[in-house]
Image: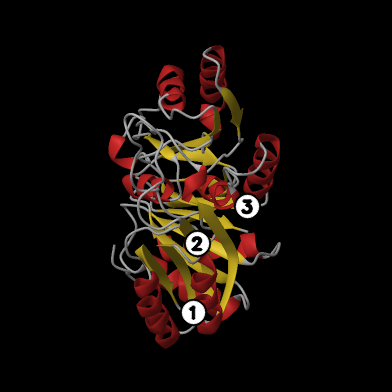
């Protein structure tokens, strides 16, 4: 695949990136060495536009499945190569790579089956699978690119426990991690895990309460680690990510921030209404300021289908001007609400 770039284009991996679904499958009769490059290399990169253009050309010559997304000095880099060291060295020459992850495809085998949304499920079974519940097609693409099987939850249509259990079992992996990404799915996820365990699958639930926590957990997921260590790392990453959200009030109601009217923009932090306003940009900026007042190094913005035009660009500029040394990454989630916010 050709490399691409842009500030808010097609979703790429989280700054916290475990990048792409692994291509290919397995032979029908006997195990075979995977075709194509042997390694997947993923990292974040701090570099200028010119250096990234040169990097893209060099990586394209080294391998395939190249994706470079980002902007304003911060980029996600993903490529499949035979020489993983050369891919990392190319990043060092271009700028400062960090959160480097190298995966050997030969360590993985088997068929990975689909969950609720076949187009968003990886193609090949790994030793450990991740199933993520997501509220939008863009988020499904993002999580699938990070190696997860996804179940898309539509507004007012949360998945049932049986549906999640089937998604876990269809991964074909002996171990699985479930990311509910919604506090309302806590009991549903627990029931699904019990159903899957009854079928012999080893399952752990990461208590993610927002998709941005799920993205953070996926960023540190490493199938080559011991199961318990991977679960601890993913849980720690999710817990270290504070989350916020914008939504639009449907009717007059009492909130923790006062009375809202239909059409008001509500700014939520950790699930509680913290601000009420008329303009999405103003409310979002205020929510970011409150969240960053407790510290943070990275802001993740997941833009929904109902977001006003230019919202992400405005917030990126706001963070750049008011919060030094804080990076911002933007993804198109296409969820129903205007915006999801994560602060790490």
Quadrant of the image occupied by residue 157? top left
Which-is-in-front pick, marks 1 and 2?
2
- Marks 1/3: CA distance? 22 Å
- Marks 2/3: CA distance? 21 Å
User: For the point 40% across and 28% down, which residue is it?
Assistant: 158
Residue 282 at x, y = what percent?
Answer: 47, 66
User: For the point 42% across and 63% down, which residue is it?
Assistant: 79
Residue that badge 3 annotates: 241
- Marks 1/2: CA distance? 17 Å
| Mark 2 vs 3, N-terminal side | 2
User: For the point 36% across and 55% down, which residue is it?
Assistant: 36
| Mark 1 vs 2, N-terminal side | 2
Is residue 65 visible to us here?
A: yes
Query: Which element is circle 3 on?
Result: loop
Question: Can you say whether 1 is above or below 198 in the image?
Answer: below
Question: Can you say whether 145 is above or below 119 in the image?
Answer: below
What numbered label is drawn on residue 42? 2
Question: Can you say whether 251 is above or below 170 in the image?
Answer: below
Residue 134 at x, y = what percent?
Answer: 42, 40
Report the coloring of the rendering: secondary structure
| Of residues 70 and 272, the one drawn nearer to the viewer in this rendering | 70
Residue that badge 1 annotates: 73
Quadrant of the image occupied by residue 118? top left
């Amino acid at each position: 695949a050709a490399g691409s770039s842009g500030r808010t284009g097609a979703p790429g991996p989280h700054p916290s990136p475990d990048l792409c679904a692994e291509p290919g499958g397995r032979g029908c009769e006997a195990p075979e060495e995977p075709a194509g490059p042997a390694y997947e290399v993923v990292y974040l990169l701090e570099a200028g536009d010119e250096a990234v253009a040169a990097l893209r050309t060099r990586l394209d010559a080294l391998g395939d499945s190249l994706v470079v997304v980002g902007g304003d000095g911060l980029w996600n880099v993903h490529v499949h190569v035979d020489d993983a060291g050369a891919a990392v060295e190319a990043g060092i020459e271009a700028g400062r790579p960090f959160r480097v992850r190298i995966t050997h495809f030969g360590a993985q085998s088997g068929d990975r089956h689909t969950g609720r949304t076949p187009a968003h499920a990886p193609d090949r079974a790994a030793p450990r699978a991740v199933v993520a519940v997501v509220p939008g097609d863009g988020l499904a693409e993002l999580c699938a690119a990070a190696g997860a099987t996804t179940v898309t939850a539509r507004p007012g249509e949360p998945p049932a426990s049986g549906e999640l259990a089937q998604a876990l079992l269809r991964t074909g992996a002996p171990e699985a991690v479930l990311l509910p990404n919604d506090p309302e799915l806590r009991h549903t996820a627990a029931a699904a895990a019990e159903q899957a365990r009854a079928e012999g699958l080893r399952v752990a639930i990461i208590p993610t309460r927002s998709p941005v926590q799920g993205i953070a957990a996926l960023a540190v997921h490493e199938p080559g680690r011991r199961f318990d260590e991977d679960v601890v790392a993913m849980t720690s990453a999710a817990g270290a990510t504070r989350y916020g959200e914008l939504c639009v009030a449907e009717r007059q109601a009492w909130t923790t921030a006062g009375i809202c009217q239909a059409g008001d923009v509500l700014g939520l932090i950790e699930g509680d209404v913290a601000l009420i306003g008329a303009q999405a940009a103003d409310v979002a900026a205020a929510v970011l300021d409150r969240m960053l007042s407790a510290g943070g190094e990275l802001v993740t913005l997941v833009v929904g289908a109902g977001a006003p035009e230019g919202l992400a660009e405005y917030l990126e500029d706001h963070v750049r001007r008011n919060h030094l040394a804080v990076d911002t990454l933007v993804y198109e989630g296409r969820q129903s609400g205007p915006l999801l916010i994560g602060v790490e």
